[in-house]
Amino acid sequence: MARIELSAIRKSFDATDVLKGVDLTIEDGEFVSLVGPSGCGKSTLLRIIAGLEPQTSGAVTIGGQPVDGVRPSQRNLAMVFQSYALYPHLSVYDNIAVPLRMKRLSTLERLPALGRLLPNRHRIEREIRGEVERVAAQLELSAYLKRKPGQLSGGQRQRVAVGRAIVRQPVAFLFDEPLSNLDAKLRVHMRAEIAQLHRRLGTTFVYVTHDQAEAMTMSGRIAVMIGGELVQVGRPAEVYDNPRDIRVAEFVGSPKINVFPGHIRTDGAVEMLGHSLGVAVPGMARPCRIGIRPERIELGATGAFAGAVVHVENMGAEAFVHLGVDGMPTPVLARIGDVRALPPLGSSTRFGVPPDAIRLFDAAGKRIETKPPAATHRAREVASV
Ligand SMILES: Nc1ncnc2c1ncn2[C@@H]1O[C@H](COP(=O)(O)OP(=O)(O)OP(=O)(O)O)[C@@H](O)[C@H]1O
């Protein structure tokens, strides 16, 4: 097991800066997902940890040891790719056994005909069989050991790739979008399997994905990368509820957070679509953006805002109501838990926003903390004494 520390990692390809100074510590045994939109640099960062790509500057340590200049094979990490990278001509058994044979058998002992005549070969092959069978049983692959990868489903192939990684007993597993080739249902199933595997092995997992739901549901912490920078690192619920940047707020959560144009008045009150919200911030008058999650939009006759129901998605257990609102370029989305109380399509409705649902961002997208108006008022009184 190992703690992985990344300090001020920069990476440029020719004139393009892909990583712009990434600092991240992944604790021993932790499951951290690197998540972010396509092209943000997640795979490059993972490849730098693995030693497959040199960083332009900055340092990587694994288990307290600097590994810059240490070859990938000497880092004792296992990488699992989206493409599985299995040997198509070898059986499942042999695919899983490859790293063990490479490690334990000499070049001569690995030769098919001559190797069999050498005294150690049988003993080592017996040990290898025990380990392959144990890992195959863990991954429910025992029935497929004689099959070739081409005779397996995508999920089974991915499990073989994971099995091949497990037998190496690496200090950490690095996953690069391992579920991208699977259909939606299987992806959800494999998420649970990978999370269980992490709990069972207790080894450090670093997992790259562009799928925020995958990252949210599996990891202990998520590291949100945007444009080559680590914008926020935290527990999934914390990042969802307390985004420090509007890009994080918009990337994490499905469906996406609603973002309204807003204005902070000279008295600190925050206005949205011409109505004052029940929050305030100190400082000067300025424009702002207001993020409100769909589940926090409250439909009801007493709401301050008016909308027209332009679309309803009823999923049975929940529904999304799309509201056309004056002053908004795209519909406002409300998530409704009780599908028996849906407003009809084309109807006019009102909606409100509880003050604690409001996430305020400045013009540059940085989070602004809000307070109830009274608290701001008191703070100003204290400040003026
Ligand atoms: N070998 C390379 N040479 C030049 N540019 C590269 C190279 N590898 C990656 N890049 C560029 O670096 C940027 C980051 O790539 P990277 O693969 O790390 O992104 P990513 O966040 O993993 O994206 P995705 O989710 O699409 O895989 C991209 O713009 C990519 O085109």
Image: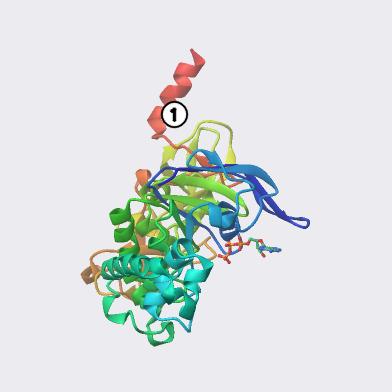
Q: Residue at x 50, y 46 (%)?
A: 232
Dot 1 falls on a residue whose secondary structure is helix
Left or right: 120 in relation to 20: left
Q: Position of residue 245 (x, y in %)?
A: 53, 47
Q: Residue at x 47, y 61 (%)?
A: 103
Which image quadrant for residue 144?
bottom left
Q: Quadrant of ligand 1?
A: bottom right
| 42 vs 275, nearest the viewer | 42
Left or right: 358 in relation to 137: right
Q: In the rendered image, is residue 243 in sight?
A: no
Which image quadrant for residue 214?
bottom left
Q: Position of residue 42 (x, y in %)?
A: 56, 57
| 333 vs 235, nearest the viewer | 235
Q: Residue at x 44, y 52 (%)?
A: 172
Q: In the rendered image, is residue 131 in sight?
A: yes
Q: Residue at x 40, y 44 (%)?
A: 28
Q: Position of residue 195 (x, y in %)?
A: 33, 59
Residue tagged by mark 1?
A: 376
Q: Amino acid at mark 1?
A: Thr
Q: Position of residue 97 (x, y in %)?
A: 40, 70
Neighbor class of circle 1 (other Cα within 10 Å; few <14, some 14-19, many 20+) is: some
Left or right: 6 in relation to 198: right
Spot the residue most to the right. 15
| 3 vs 293, nearest the viewer | 3
Tally of numbered discs = 1
